[in-house]
Image (cartoon, grey):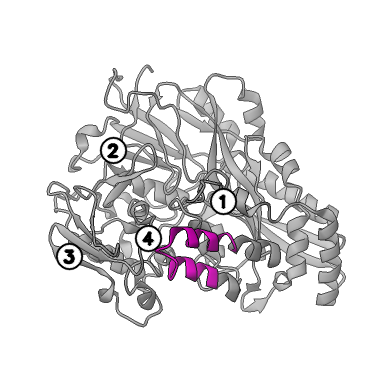
């Protein structure tokens, strides 16, 4: 979101791991409720980018989604094992025999930070707002083909009021799905599905969620000291939260740090309790007791834009895409640039993430490698592509973030392309994260570093991104055969778990081997320093990166 996820920050963590789905560590067996705790419960953290949006309907990046996950809450929330458990709901939903109608009972003691009760109408308003084409919510596609009438509403064929969600009464919510959906529970823990107070949002109008005072909160914390553009913000306990007794931290201070040397210095001087590490600092600190590496389910890839400003780019040529993709030595990239435990990705769906319902085999193993480094094939495709375009050379622009480590990563890729593909000139465009997001949304780029962290535990959280018309498919890629696979998995096969899985196994060979629409680069791992006194900092395997609700300080 990242994630979400979610766009990932291609900054300080790009080379060490980026801020996306699942940060954490330092957890012991106390689960936040036992053991002694320090008198001063203050946690000091960093992010590597500003908050682009704190609006739960519109946020689509790792930083914004992480903020919303601390300050607001949906029907369900992920526990430490990644299982969606009742949160805003009193218990798991009652489900109809055909597995399409879910009925939720809401907590009587759930309140907004202004004292208003959280009601079923708050969910109805939020979900209708998310699918309304006027909102232009990036994550509207999560409802597409899932909730009754969502697809038609998103296309402008029906009204948002016709969405398959209704308030039976103030504390009873009914949702009607198009098809049975095995991962629906985990989606309910994702911020786009959180409730919104309609009266407050409409009173704020265009100013809603532009700073910490223009948001209502119903989660464990409230966001404070954020002016909408600042490099610092904080979280403080929400005294109207129904489970406020579980919250131990009195304050969480967050600052944006884009340089690994600065983050290590702040950590060593006690101003940060956790510091992400670039390759250089990962190597320097790997023998320390507080050095940690965590594997993640976030995948980074090169995104090839086939149309820019209404005109086809050279990347509309399949052979040019293939040449650029296959000429990158991924193993050398992770060994020399990242050096943080990340591994080459020869596929979009990550390893150790989702498994065959029949025999528990990894999706990655069943599909096998796609998009592997092959310099001979790359050179052959390059020669053919130039011939098809009627040129002998190309100038292309590669976009990434503007942090020190993102620049190093871009320079490695630039060197690979220009060294391996004769006649290619690559211009690097390193810009702030917020600008990269805006350029991506406008489809104003040639090719770029991109990334995705899973929003829920299913291959479709990755595969759906590249369906024709998906709000994340901002590169003019379209293949009817690929779309059919995605539609079959979401529609006719939704109720047949094994048949659906088998269908999704066919997707990556089309997307990557046949069309080379993207090029997977690496599956992220995070190298960081974390103080041992930080307890129960929950790392989420999908969705927003962290959950701080049960975190506490002990032994500082």
Disc 2 and disc 1: Cα gap in Å? 41 Å
| Picture residue at 31% right of the left edge, 37% below the top | 549
Q: Is residue 32 above or below residue 112?
A: above
Whether the residues at callouts 3 and 2 have beta carbons within 8 Å, the answer is no
Residue 135 as seen in the image, left or right of residue 311: left
Whether the residues at callouts 2 and 4 have beta carbons within 8 Å, the answer is no
| Picture residue at 37% right of the left edge, 16% below the top | 555
Instruction: Locate residue 528, reporting x and y percent.
Output: 54, 31
Closer to the eye: label 3 or 2: 3
**Label 4 or label 1, whichever comes before in sequence order:** 4
Closer to the eye: label 1 or 3: 1
Whether the residues at callouts 4 and 1 have beta carbons within 8 Å, the answer is no
Q: Which residue is mark 4?
A: 181
Q: Which residue is mark 1?
A: 363
Disc 4 and disc 1: Cα gap in Å? 19 Å
Q: Which SS class for mark 1? A: helix
**Label 1 or label 3, whichever comes before in sequence order:** 3
Q: Is residue 100 visible?
A: yes
Disc 1 and disc 3: Cα gap in Å? 38 Å
Residue 79 as seen in the image, left or right of residue 291: left
Residue extending farthest to the front is 358
Q: Does 503 lie within the magenta span?
A: yes
């Amino acid at each position: 979101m990242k994630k979400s996820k979610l766009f990932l920050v291609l900054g300080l963590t790009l080379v060490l791991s980026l801020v996306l789905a699942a940060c954490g560590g330092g957890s012991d067996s106390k689960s936040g409720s036992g053991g002694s705790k320090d008198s001063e419960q203050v946690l000091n953290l960093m992010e590597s980018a500003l908050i682009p949006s704190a609006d739960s309907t519109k946020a689509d990046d790792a930083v914004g989604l992480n903020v919303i996950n601390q300050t607001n809450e949906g029907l369900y929330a992920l526990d430490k094992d990644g299982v969606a458990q009742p949160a805003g709901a009193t218990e798991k939903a009652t489900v109809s025999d055909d597995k399409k109608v879910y009925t939720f009972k809401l907590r009587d003691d759930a309140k907004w930070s202004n004292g208003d009760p959280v009601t079923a109408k708050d969910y109805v308003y939020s979900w209708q707002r998310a699918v309304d084409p006027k909102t232009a919510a990036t994550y509207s596609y999560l409802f597409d083909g899932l909730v009754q009438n969502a697809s038609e509403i998103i296309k402008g064929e029906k009204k948002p009021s016709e969405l398959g969600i209704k308030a039976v009464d103030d504390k009873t919510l009914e949702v009607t799905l198009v098809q049975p959906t095995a991962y629906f529970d985990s989606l309910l823990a994702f911020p786009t599905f959180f409730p919104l107070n309609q009266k407050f949002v409409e009173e704020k109008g265009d100013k809603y969620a532009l700073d910490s005072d223009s948001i209502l909160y119903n989660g464990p914390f409230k966001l404070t000291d954020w002016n909408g553009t600042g490099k610092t913000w904080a979280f403080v306990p929400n005294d109207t939260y129904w489970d406020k007794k579980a919250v131990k931290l009195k304050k969480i201070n967050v600052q944006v740090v884009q340089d690994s040397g600065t983050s290590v210095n702040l950590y060593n001087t006690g101003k940060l309790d956790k510091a992400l590490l670039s390759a250089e600092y990962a190597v320097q600190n790997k023998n320390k007791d507080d050095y940690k590496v965590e594997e993640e389910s976030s995948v980074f890839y090169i995104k090839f834009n086939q149309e820019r400003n209404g005109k086809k780019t050279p990347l509309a040529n399949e052979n040019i895409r293939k040449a650029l993709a296959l000429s990158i030595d991924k193993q050398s990239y992770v060994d020399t640039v990242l050096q943080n435990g990340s591994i080459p990705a020869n596929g979009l769906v990550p390893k150790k993430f989702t498994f065959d319902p029949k025999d528990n085999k990894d999706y990655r193993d069943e599909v096998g490698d796609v998009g592997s480094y092959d310099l001979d094939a790359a050179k052959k495709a390059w020669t053919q592509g130039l011939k098809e375009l009627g040129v002998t050379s190309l100038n292309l622009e590669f976009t990434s973030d503007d942090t020190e480590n993102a620049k190093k990563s871009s320079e490695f890729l630039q060197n690979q392309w220009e060294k391996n593909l004769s006649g290619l000139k690559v211009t690097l465009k390193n810009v702030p994260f917020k600008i990269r997001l805006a350029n991506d949304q406008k489809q104003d780029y040639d090719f770029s570093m991109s990334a995705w962290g899973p929003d829920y535990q299913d291959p479709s959280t990755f595969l759906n991104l590249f369906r024709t018309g998906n709000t994340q498919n901002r590169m003019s890629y379209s293949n009817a055969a690929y779309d059919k696979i995605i539609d079959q998995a979401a529609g006719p096969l939704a109720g047949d778990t094994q048949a659906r899985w088998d269908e999704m196994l066919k997707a990556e060979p089309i997307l990557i081997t046949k069309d080379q629409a993207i090029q997977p680069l690496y599956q992220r791992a995070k190298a960081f320093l974390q103080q041992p006194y930080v307890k129960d900092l929950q790392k989420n395997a999908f969705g927003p990166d962290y959950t701080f609700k049960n975190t506490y300080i002990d032994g500082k």
